[in-house]
Image (cartoon, coloured by chain):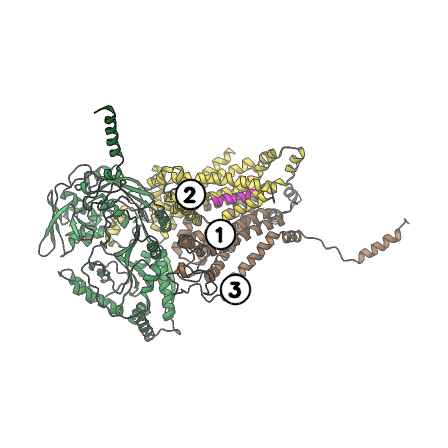
Amino acid sequence: MNLLSKYAATGIVLAAITTSPVSAAGTHPVTGEALAADQTFTYRLLDEHSSVDPQIVEDVNGSELVRDLFEGLMNQNAAGELVPGVATHFETNDAKNVYTFHLRDNAKWSDGKPVTAHDFVFAWRRLADPETASPYSWFADLMSIEGVGPVMKGEASPDTLGVRAVDDHTLEVRLTASLPYFPAMTTHASTFPSPSWTIKAHGKEWTKPGNIVSNGAYILTEHVPQERSVRERNPSYWNNGATILEKVVSLVINDENTALTRYLAGELDKTEIPAGQYPRLSKEHPDQAKSFPRLCNYYYTFNLSDSGPKAFKDVRVRKALSFALDRNIITDDVLQGGQFQAYTFTPAATANFDVPDVDFAGLTQAQRDAKATELMAAAGYGSDNPLKFKMLYNTSEGHKKIAIAMTQMWKQKLGVEIELANMEWKTFLDVRGKQDFELARGAWCGDYNEASTFLDLLTSQSGYNDGKYNNAEVDKLMQGAKTMSDPSGNYTRVEQILAEEMPVIPVYHYTGVFMLNTALKGWPFGNVEQNWYSRNLYKVAE
Amino acid sequence: MLNYVIRRIAIALPTLLILIIISFLLMHAAPGGPFTSERPLPPQVLANIEAKYGLDLPIWQQMVNYTWGILTEFDFGPSFRYKDRTVNEIIEQGFPITLTYGFLSFIVAVVVGLSLGVIAAIRQNSWIDYIAVGITIGAQVLPNFVMAPLLVITFTLWLGWLPGGGWSGGEWQYLVMPVIALSTSYMASIARITRSSMLEVLNTNFIRTAKAKGLPYRTIILRHALKPAMLPVISYLGPAFVGMITGSVVIDIYFSTGGMGYFFVNSATNRDYSVMMGITILFGALTILFNLVVDLLYAWIDPKIRY
Amino acid sequence: MFPGEKKVEAMAEHLSTLDEVKGRSLWGDARRRFMLNRAAITSLGILVIIVLFSLLGAHFSDWSNEEIDWAILGMVAEKGQPSLESGHFFGADEMGRDLYARVVQGTQISLMVGVVGAMIAVIVGTLYGAISGYVGGRTDQVMMRIVDILMSIPYMFVLILLLVVFGRSIIMLFIGIGLISWLDMSRIVRGQTLALKNKEFVEAARSIGVPGSRIILRHIIPNLLGVVVVYATLLVPNMILTESFISFLGLGVQEPNTSWGALISEGAGTIQYGVEWQLLFPLAFFVVSLFCFYFIGDGLRDALDPKDR
């Protein structure tokens, strides 16, 4: 080859290498889409997370981070179904109170050490141990692990907890109750393993970038509180080959309108849509505005304890208020995010839950209003004797709007006079927890995808039953549901009782409403618990 | 004068102590605690956690322990809400941020405000004066929580010149909007005060004498009129400083700068006792120091004032 | 006898029948000067109109400040625009409530907060600061130390805690704002008093034996008025701004009542969504009122300042 053709050949080769960023990033192994060169996902957080220590984290933001940094026994796929995580499979006995998980042998921590069953034993003991002072230690109680009660009280040593490592790759758990949905609970961040050697070496500082050792698809590389967190690919992750996103950045932006502005300016890939803006945004940016069901409800609870107002002891008053509420206005005119009107306490999106036919759901609003007026009159309230009470909610723009709409509806239809009060979160919880209210807002997101996570709230022993509703039949049905293989019949019956007695006013069921960059793919819209994993996401080339 | 300074510093310590006590008591009077949550812990677990943080001790004991910790080790304790961090860390990280943009805002407000006020006073009733007064009033009435989102919309969304928020170690692009939003209303106040006080000074006898002596106008303004005119401005600096600390909350919320202001308000709503106390003490000490500086400036400017 | 004596006598008699010449008081002079200041008078007029608006405006509207117009709820950007036919003179807010009625009610609250807060500051702060500055010595030290201590307590935190502990109410708001507003004034007044008390006329008064309290009340305070008035007119807006900041934090007036601050902070949030009137109307009232306070303050200062211009 003469000199000219050599140069030409070199030039051509160089050009080929440097001018194909798309082929440098590659294509998606499964879908074949062309991937973007910059695989960074930036999203918005409302508030700084409390911690990234799996046994200490208590908020949703923190859990999102922990799910990327660590990995538990099981994971969820895009539809919310259980898929293997660190555990490849599990077995249980007939009574469903002993579970044996088999761990894979190639799972590693980011410092190279293998992930073993001992790491899980360490973590679960740590969760229940009062020394750790975990705000989520009640989850260990919920898991009904043998011996958890005395451990949490500090009366027994954590080694007495009913979890043990049969060998390095086999974990055995003994429960005090029969829980068919126990494996689903292992997707929860509190059950993720933690590296005992790192915690011993660094103490409280072990979660700082540089110290932290994690077994998930990403490792924490930067954390500036109240500003941003950055996590990057963890090469030691057993499934690192399938991870496409290189970097995930979460920015804390308190004001949702500013966050939206910055999203539109291109600084973010995902942000929440402020209430009422979804219709406009879905018209202007149809592919980016998303709305899909989520596993949370929104309700107002009557104070049925002795300190509650006399009027609320009358079921006719309660039903009248619930009937007169036009839920369509709330979902279609106030929230406008595709939310679902709620006539039952449990959201329809819950797995294995058939929404039972409760009678007032089938009526038109006009019929409900007529019934409401009747009931209220029968109970002795009217324009000459108006019903008066105080309505309490925690400070937020969204809750304020809903509360205002509700009070106006009741005022116009039933002549009710309501005093609105809002308190900031902690005061609100304190006041509600002491039954120092008349009608208070409540909301519940399921801890696992099954109706009992909601309905258990209304049993008399539940610690979260702030309205102090007490119905022996509901208690019996929920107790029985724990051991039945198909408890849906009990759940239906409970919802019907709730509709007859109306201890709470269900308002709506949540949807996830956010703006998502069209280049970001793989988001699990079908997962109502919204357990998403960054390693399943990827960005395509525009 | 030195005596005075020493006395002031000596008094500052008991002042701080009283500040600590009042804050502590007020905080513990509020309902709810750091561990009040929607999923309340079983009572024994709650008791254990509180014992671990020393919250089960009687109030006076907690206060003594806390004060002792500060005096002996400068240890402000752990944060109850941000479990991975101590208050010292939060302060170490957030304080330089607030200080940076706060200090810059202060300088901008004083320099621009003084200049604008002096110019308006010199050219009283001219169109310059009217424009200056108009700008200052306009700037003063726009609350910073209206200005902040408007700035972001203008500079980030429409023009794309500046990033919408964040801190990134304090690069200049992240400073521009916070400083504008924070300094504007104080700049306006300073301009107004300067103008009115300068007008008064320009009509006094000694200025008249200086004019009669034939001194150049610039010398009159800068060497003779400015100092006494600045007295009311200096008294205003103290409240301005405190106001900027408050204003920094809005800046932190809108621009996600990670400064102390937001932690401050947040810790109140989270009942994060130690963070709240730490920041209160810090701001309190700063305010006391600043007031001392202001008083000294007074004495320097007006030789008739003696302490 | 001197020439023209008769004429002089006649003139003297004529003069004695005329009315006594009325003396002109200083306050009369001040009032006259104020009346000549067109900007100040105009501002006073505008403020009076705004006050009347807040008291009587509700009569002109069919809507109350809390009623939701269900027909436009959810479509406020399209249907909630200001118009005379729909009865929503200023348009509707995000919840479909009439903005005109809400602005009327908000004006009442904001003006009250501003005036009451400023009055507390002026009265308490001036007296406190003047006494402290004039008496000097240890009393001054102690009094100012108390102010220092109170000022070092970051007021926002105290206010938040007060509102959290004692619940939200207008009274609490007044107490909270009153607690912080007089401190600044007292410092400024004290500073000015320190400068004034060494002036010659005070020395003169002291030397002829005028008691301290009279000196403070009759000599020092009137001379302070210029600075006090300017700062007070800076205060009214500040009070209103403080209240708006508290509303922004969610701790201010409770629903369904509202204030300028609450309306403005809601409007600022929605400005991008095509509903600009929600910000513009309350902001306009806010800005215009504050402008008026400023011009009146300037006018008062020009009128009361005993130094001739």
**Mark 1 belongs to which subunit?**
C
Q: Is disc 1 surrounded by few (<14), some (14 to 19) or many (20+) residues within 10 Å?
A: many
* Residue A471 among magenta residues: no
Q: CA distance from mark 2 to mark 1?
A: 23 Å
Image x and y of residue A177, in percent: 14, 56
Image x and y of residue B197, in percent: 58, 42
Q: Do residues under tags 2 and 1 come within 8 Å of each other at their CB atoms? A: no
Q: CA distance from mark 1 to mark 3?
A: 24 Å
Q: Do residues under tags 3 and 2 come within 8 Å of each other at their CB atoms? A: no
Marks 3 and 2 belong to one chain: no
**Mark 2 belongs to which subunit?**
B
* Residue identifier under label 3: C56
Image x and y of residue B115, in percent: 54, 39
Of C278 and C19, nearer the camera is: C278
Q: Identify the residue shown where x is 52% and y is 55%.
A: C115
* Residue identifier under label 1: C239
Q: Colour of chain A?
A: green
Chain shown brown: that is C
Considering only order in the chain, which callout, 3 or 1, is on the residue closer to the N terminus? 3
Q: Which amino acid type is shown beneath numbered disc 3? A: Leu
* Residue B187 among magenta residues: yes
* Residue identifier under label 2: B178
**Mark 3 belongs to which subunit?**
C
Chain shown yellow: that is B
- Give the magenta-colored segment's residue range: B184-194
Pick out the residue farthest to the left: A94
Marks 1 and 3 belong to one chain: yes
Task: Assign a secondary structure to mark 3.
Answer: helix
Image x and y of residue C301, in percent: 60, 48
Question: Measured along the vertical axis of the image, is residue A386 above or below residue B307?
Answer: below
Q: Is disc 2 surrounded by few (<14), some (14 to 19) or many (20+) residues within 10 Å?
A: many
Task: Assign a secondary structure to mark 2.
Answer: helix
